Image (tube, rainbow, N blue to C red):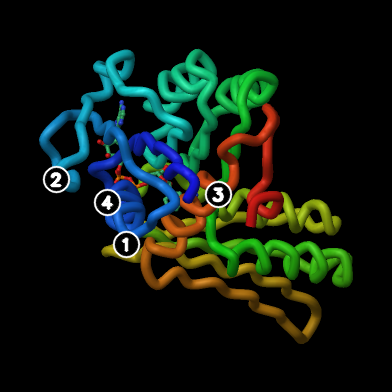
């Protein structure tokens, strides 16, 4: 059997980090060798070495970093991967233009994937949105997203990615965001014409869909040449 891919989970104590730690422990094709959070000692699976954000230089050798943290925590983990020649999978949203530029530069040295949504359903929704937009010129396009009240960025990264798909089809999307309760993630893309409407909706029921997609991508990214990959390249 081939060796398990060594993962570093960045943002391990968070909502997504907890799902990643739990699901990674169930897989045989990967092993978590380190868990990084803002502070050590927060709800991380037993037996995995933990590191605080300011201890990054001390993490053990790893093949792929899987990052679901915050935009403000993004630069050091990308830099560490580039420095160590490790692959990088990130689901962190709310990144700045400068951070996107840094991703493009790092992709010259390491294989990486930065995606606003790791679910298969949203990948399909994105294709439907582009198709609807190009078939419905002149219709109003609105994207309404809802997330839990702890989410920092708005509109969500997924809403912006769906908006980019709508723009590809020629629409000019507008955005509305709701932050309430414990909603995992819901996206409605509405096309409104004269006397008729189309509504395309995706609802995430739990975070495992994103965590599974990210772990799958991490295992498939390991060993590939440097470059910026898309989720569909790895599914
Ligand atoms: P969360 O607030 O529950 O967790 C954030 C994690 O980041 C925590 O572990 C925290 O300790 C850590 N962190 C904070 N500051 C840090 C720092 N300076 N250095 C290192 N770690 C630090 O957030 P969440 O709900 O788990 O979401 C995390 C990110 O993932 C968000 O950007 C969210 O939008 C995104 N997300 C993406 C997808 C996707 O499919 N791409 C799905 C869900 C969430």
Q: Quadrant of residue 35?
A: top left
Q: Earlier in the sequence, mark 4 or mark 1?
A: 4
Label 1 sits on residue: 180
> Decide: marks 4, 1 in contact (CB < 8 A)?
no
For marks 2 and 3, give the CA distance. Answer: 24 Å
Q: Which mark is residue 18?
A: 4
For marks 4 and 3, give the CA distance. Answer: 18 Å
Q: Considering depth in this image, is 176 or 120 the residue closer to the camera?
A: 120
Q: Residue at x 55, y 49 (%)?
A: 217
Camera-near label (3 vs 1) is 3
For marks 3 and 1, give the CA distance. Answer: 30 Å
Q: Residue at x 42, y 44 (%)?
A: 4
Camera-near label (4 vs 3) is 3
Location of residue 44 in the rendering, given as x and y in whole percent from the top left corner? 18, 44
The answer to whether residue 127 of the structure is visible from this angle is yes
Query: Taking the image as four quarters, which one is ligand 1 found in?
Result: top left
Q: Earlier in the sequence, mark 2 or mark 3?
A: 2
Q: Residues within 10 Å of mark 2 (few under 14, many from 20)?
A: few
Camera-near label (4 vs 1) is 4
> Decide: marks 4, 2 in contact (CB < 8 A)?
no
Q: Considering depth in this image, is 27 or 12 the residue closer to the camera?
A: 27
Label 3 sits on residue: 217
Label 2 sits on residue: 46
Q: Earlier in the sequence, mark 2 or mark 1?
A: 2
Q: Earlier in the sequence, mark 4 or mark 2?
A: 4
């Amino acid at each position: 059997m081939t060796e398990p891919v060594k993962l570093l989970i960045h943002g391990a104590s968070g909502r997504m980090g907890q799902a990643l730690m739990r699901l990674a422990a169930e897989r045989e094709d990967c092993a978590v060798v380190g868990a990084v959070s803002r502070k050590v000692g927060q709800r991380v699976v037993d037996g995995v070495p933990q590191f605080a954000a300011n201890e990054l230089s001390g993490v053990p050798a790893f093949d792929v970093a899987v990052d679901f943290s915050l935009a403000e925590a993004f630069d050091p983990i990308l830099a560490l991967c580039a420095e160590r020649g490790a692959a990088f999978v990130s689901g962190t949203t709310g990144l700045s233009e400068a951070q996107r530029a840094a991703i493009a530069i790092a992709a010259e040295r390491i294989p990486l994937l930065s995606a606003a949504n790791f679910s298969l359903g949203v990948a399909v929704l994105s294709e439907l949105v582009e198709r609807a937009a190009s078939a419905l010129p002149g219709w109003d396009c609105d994207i309404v997203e809802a997330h839990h009240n702890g989410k920092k960025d708005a509109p969500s990264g997924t809403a912006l990615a769906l908006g980019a798909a709508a723009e590809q089809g020629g629409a000019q999307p507008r955005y509305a965001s709701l932050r309430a309760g414990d909603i995992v993630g819901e996206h409605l893309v509405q096309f409104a014409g004269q006397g008729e409407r189309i509504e395309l909706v995706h609802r995430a029921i739990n975070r495992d869909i994103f965590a599974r997609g990210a772990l799958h991508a991490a295992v498939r990214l390991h060993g590939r040449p440097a470059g910026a990959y898309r989720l569909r390249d790895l599914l």
